[in-house]
């Protein structure tokens, strides 16, 4: 009974550290529960794009689980210091290490029960709001919300393992450290760090490489593959530069006597310099978490807001009918089906364009057949369609100078092609003009592959290419032209639905329409946006917790110093100015670095958005600006709240 009493009293006594730990654990449980509820929801499983949405939710579950572990470990690291000192005191009073272990597992059990109960309750309550948001984003119907046995088992097993690991860290600490070390665990200081010029150069080099990859990547597919390399370089560089560069800057400030020997500057520079190793790691973590939140929000919001533009690119008209034979689609027959269903066809036109052939576009201007190895690699993969010069003139309603037999026009949907010629196998064609667009032709493909349209003088050219181009190295790839009819329809939603259902039954005709595609994309992008919001909340929560614990730990470390300074005459106003000076450093530096990282990441983000068909225009830039402003406000509110905690600890009350 004594062990239970001591465990409970320890939690109450250290509530300043325990409550944020309980809060972090409860939020982690709630976020995991929401994802679990959605994965097993019948409403999600009934969506048209259910497979893609569930895959995204499963990916989100994996990331949130990893973040949950990081949250618990990070918050517990601060709490553990207080517990070590307490265990040292218990040892002096005569307790054995076995008694300390018994107290520890009781504390972990109390924490686990509290976290899971609060997390499941709050998760179930707030999941109603979040799932309503999810329904709105994906355009689904009302989802039945049931806490399944599988979701509860996952939560209990996962967090049992997490708290078991925390308990084992306590056991390891108790068994390894001496009593005197435990007692003084919270009083360990940091030696003044040395200047490491080699590390500084390494950090600058890594950062430059990461930025260079982002600024120079041209292919959207390469951007997706190189994104993680750039992230690793920038993350490593950020930690190195925060530790090394900040030390050098602070030492330069210290050498400036006019600046350094002022009350608020003296305390700020001295405190940060002697604890820079710990400070720099925390500040770097804040900067990176803020960067991740910015990148995720900008990417997912841009995708969700820009989905309508993508549909407009993919569908110049509401309906696209494609003939599976060489014959043109009868407009008279289509109008009859439309009339039978009460809709009217408008703005129709015909389009003759080839099927797509796939190949490796080496050095941007040499197309080679896919081989066994290259067929499974996205690097340099391109899809090409062909259009005759006559069709191009019809689509653009203009007379142009006739192309020679070795001349072509090139329309690159991703706008990455900039060469003067292109070689198909061993035959080279001169690129007379690079087109910005072709009127009436979809400017986006339903897949994420780099795609181009080649305007050739006649079908004879494509016949020659088709006879010589090798598909996957085992059979010839024939280039055939398909006849399409594109048009808009007017009528009620039900009439349109009936017409599209009727037209899909016609033999030798395949139909695509804007409405059903929009529904599928809304489910996909909506699910993506929802996961992005959950990630962003997690990153912001982690940032807030790091800032809070930094203020608590540093406040307690600085308490004795400020107490001495106040005893020898330092006023509360001077203490406040000193605190504000230190907070300006801590507040401005991470958010500034995060914004710089985001700016250099934008070219790569743009390329990734292009893979999803998102136009890089005002929508993306406005989203970016609003996101940065919103993050600064949230960041400021977090610091405004936590700085009061720091000031209350270092400011000695007048007696």
Image: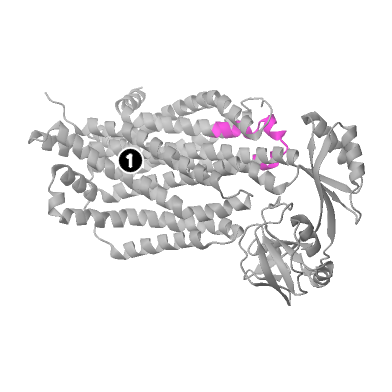
Which residue shows up at 12% across the image and 48% down it? 261
The answer to whether residue 102 is visible is no
Q: Residue furthest left?
A: 568
Say which residue appears at 52% left-offset and 33% top-offset.
31
Residue 456 percent coordinates (x, y): 77, 67
Which residue is the site of mark 1?
Answer: 174
- Picture quarter with the C terminus: top left
Q: Residue furthest bottom?
A: 426
In the foreground, 183 or 450: 450
| Residues shaded magenta | 32-53
Q: How many marks?
A: 1
Direction from residue 397 to residue 528 in the image, left or right: left
Q: Is residue 356 above or below residue 188?
A: below
- The one nearer the camera, 462 or 33, is 462
Majority secondary structure of magenta residues: helix
**Dot 1: what SS?**
helix
């Amino acid at each position: 009974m004594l062990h239970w009493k001591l465990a409970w009293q320890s939690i109450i006594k250290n509530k300043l550290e325990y409550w944020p730990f309980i809060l972090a654990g409860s939020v982690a449980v709630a976020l995991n529960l929401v994802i679990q509820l959605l994965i097993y929801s019948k409403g999600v499983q009934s969506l048209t794009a259910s497979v893609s949405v569930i895959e995204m939710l499963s990916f989100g579950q994996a990331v949130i689980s990893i973040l949950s572990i990081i949250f618990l470990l990070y918050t517990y690291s601060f709490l553990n210091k207080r517990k070590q000192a307490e265990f040292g005191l218990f040892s002096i009073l005569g307790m054995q290490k076995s008694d300390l272990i018994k107290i520890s597992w009781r504390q972990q059990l109390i924490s686990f029960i509290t976290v899971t109960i609060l997390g499941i309750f709050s998760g179930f309550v707030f999941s109603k709001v979040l799932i309503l948001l999810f329904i709105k984003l994906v355009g689904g119907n009302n989802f039945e919300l049931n806490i399944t046995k599988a979701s509860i088992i996952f939560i209990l097993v996962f967090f049992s393992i997490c708290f078991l690991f925390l308990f084992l860290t306590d056991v390891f600490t108790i068994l390894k450290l001496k009593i005197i070390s435990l007692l003084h665990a919270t009083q360990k200081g940091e030696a003044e760090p040395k200047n490491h010029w080699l590390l500084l150069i390494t950090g600058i080099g890594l950062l430059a490489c990461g930025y260079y990859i982002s600024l120079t990547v041209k292919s959207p597919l390469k951007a997706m593959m190189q994104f993680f390399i750039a992230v690793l370089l920038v993350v490593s560089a950020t930690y190195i530069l925060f530790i090394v560069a900040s030390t050098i800057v602070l030492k330069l400030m210290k050498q400036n006597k006019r600046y350094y020997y002022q009350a608020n500057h003296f305390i700020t520079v001295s405190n940060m310099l002697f604890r820079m190793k710990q400070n720099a790691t925390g500040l770097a973590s804040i900067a990176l978490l803020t960067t991740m939140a910015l990148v995720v929000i900008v990417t997912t919001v841009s995708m969700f807001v820009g989905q309508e533009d993508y549909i407009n690119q993919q569908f110049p008209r509401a309906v696209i009918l494609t003939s599976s034979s060489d014959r043109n689609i009868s407009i008279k027959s289509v109008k009859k089906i439309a009339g039978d269903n009460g809709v009217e066809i408008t703005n129709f036109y015909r389009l003759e364009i080839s099927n797509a052939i796939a190949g490796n576009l080496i050095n941007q201007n040499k197309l080679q057949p896919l081989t066994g190895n290259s067929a499974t690699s996205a690097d340099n993969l391109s899809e090409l369609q062909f259009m005759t010069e006559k069709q191009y003139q019809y689509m653009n309603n203009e007379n142009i100078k006739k192309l020679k037999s070795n001349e072509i026009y090139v329309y690159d949907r991703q706008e990455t092609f900039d060469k003067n010629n292109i070689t198909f196998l061993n035959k080279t064609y001169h690129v007379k003009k690079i087109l910005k667009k072709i009127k009436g032709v979809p400017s986006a493909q339903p897949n994420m592959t780099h795609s181009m349209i080649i305007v050739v003088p006649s079908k004879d050219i494509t016949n020659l290419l088709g006879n010589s181009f090798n598909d996957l190295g085992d059979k010839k790839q024939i280039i055939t032209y398909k006849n399409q009819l594109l048009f808009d329809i007017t009528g009620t939603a039900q009439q349109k639905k009936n017409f599209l259902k009727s037209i899909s039954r016609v033999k030798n005709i395949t139909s695509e329409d804007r409405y059903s595609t929009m529904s599928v994309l809304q489910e996909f992008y909506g699910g993506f946006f929802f996961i992005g919001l959950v990630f962003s909340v997690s990153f912001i929560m982690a940032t807030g917790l790091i800032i809070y614990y930094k203020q608590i730990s540093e406040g307690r470390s600085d308490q004795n110093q400020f107490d001495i300074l106040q005893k020898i005459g330092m006023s509360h106003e001077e203490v406040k100015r000193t605190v504000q000076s230190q907070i300006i450093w801590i507040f401005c530096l991470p958010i500034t670095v995060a914004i710089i990282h985001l700016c250099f990441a934008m070219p790569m983000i743009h390329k990734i958005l292009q893979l999803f068909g998102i136009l890089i225009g005002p929508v993306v830039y406005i989203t970016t600006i609003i996101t940065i402003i919103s993050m600064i406000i949230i960041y400021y509110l977090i610091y405004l709240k936590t700085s009061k905690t720091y000031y209350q600890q270092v400011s000695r009350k007048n007696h």
